[in-house]
Image (spheres, rainbow, N blue to C red):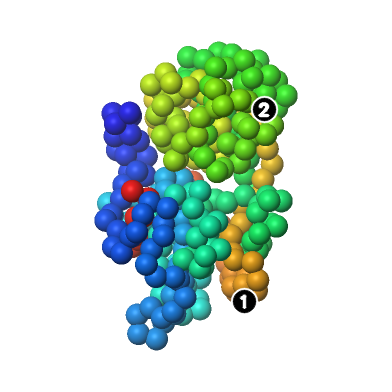
Amino acid sequence: MKKILSLVLAIMLCIFGAVSATGCKNKNGESGNKSSGSGDGDKPKFTVLTNCPFAPFEYTEKGKIYGIDMEIAAGFANEYGYKLVIKNIDFDAIESQVSAGYGDIGMAGMSITPKRLASFDFSTEYYSASQVVVVKKSDTSFDSCTTKEEVDNVLKTKNKIGAQSGTTGFSYITGTLKLGQSSQKGYEDGVSAVTDMKNGNIDAVIIDKAPATALVANVSGLKMINVDLTEEAYAFLIKKGNTDLVAKMNAYLAKIKENGEFDKIVSKYNGGEGEKIGYDFTDENV
């Protein structure tokens, strides 16, 4: 596992890096201070909860955090005069920590789902997404598949399928495919799932298309099955009833889409030109 993770680190913008956290309580992101209150001087804090590695939306390199979501967060904080605080925590913990007030917003490539809508508010959609299958390059069982149904049928013949726990990909395994416990495996992140697959412990990984594309392009021996299993939309997750933050974020997203800044951010993290900006963060996902 470590050999493959080293490959990902070296080639894929070091997306599995970290810095030491201060004031951490545990890996679920429960810190000693909630997100409300002042930051430096008179600036109020804007606390972002995220989960790495999930390039191109968030990843770490040389002690800094980068990505589409992070640059949007930084721009938003600057727009409204907030002190930006970024915490890298378990993906499964983001919802509970936003609810408890340990973070103002979840920015982690989060899909809008009926279950989440029942408990949280969301910003406007900012990115269209889908789930795809990643397998070893030597796996030819999907080669003739052109539809979701055909891919599903092949997946059901596999011994074990993996995905990051708490994600749409994992829900696809348990809900759509209805695979039993012996045929499924959850992971802390997509890189760990792919690593386990390369080690021969699972047969396929279901993951969001953007990180799947990055992994396949930069890690040898993988291929992506180019059939979308879902149609999704990413948005930022906000505590239910925090209408002020929803309104401000929606206004900011509208502004950067109108002036072209949003497209510039997305482009540079998908092979385009432009300087990528890294930010300080605390790593509570340890």
Give the camera-side residue of 147 and 276.
147
* Quadrant in the picture for residue 140: top right
Q: Report if the CB atoms under discs 2 and 1 are less than 8 Å apart.
A: no
Which residue type carries mark 1? Asp
Q: Which comes before the other along the chain, label 2 or label 1?
A: 2
Which of the numbered marks, if any, corresponds to residue 177? 2
Residue bearing mark 1 = 244
**Mark nearer the viewer, 2 or 1:** 2
Query: Where residue 38 sits in the image (x, y, percent)?
Result: 41, 81
What residue is at 44 percent from the left and 40 percent from the top? 188
Local secondary structure at mark 1: helix
Regarding residue 217, the answer to whether it shows in the image is: no
Mark 1 surroundings: few (<14), some (14-19) or many (≥20) residues within 10 A: few
Which of the numbered marks, if any, corresponds to residue 31? none
What residue is at 54 percent from the left and 50 percent from the top? 109
Query: Where residue 110 sits in the image (x, y, percent)?
Result: 57, 51
162 in relation to 24, above or below: above
Local secondary structure at mark 2: loop
What residue is at 37 percent from the left and 39 percent from the top? 12
- Is 222 displayed left or right of 113 in the figure? left
Query: Where residue 165 sits in the image (x, y, percent)?
Result: 52, 40
Regarding residue 184, the answer to whether it shows in the image is: yes
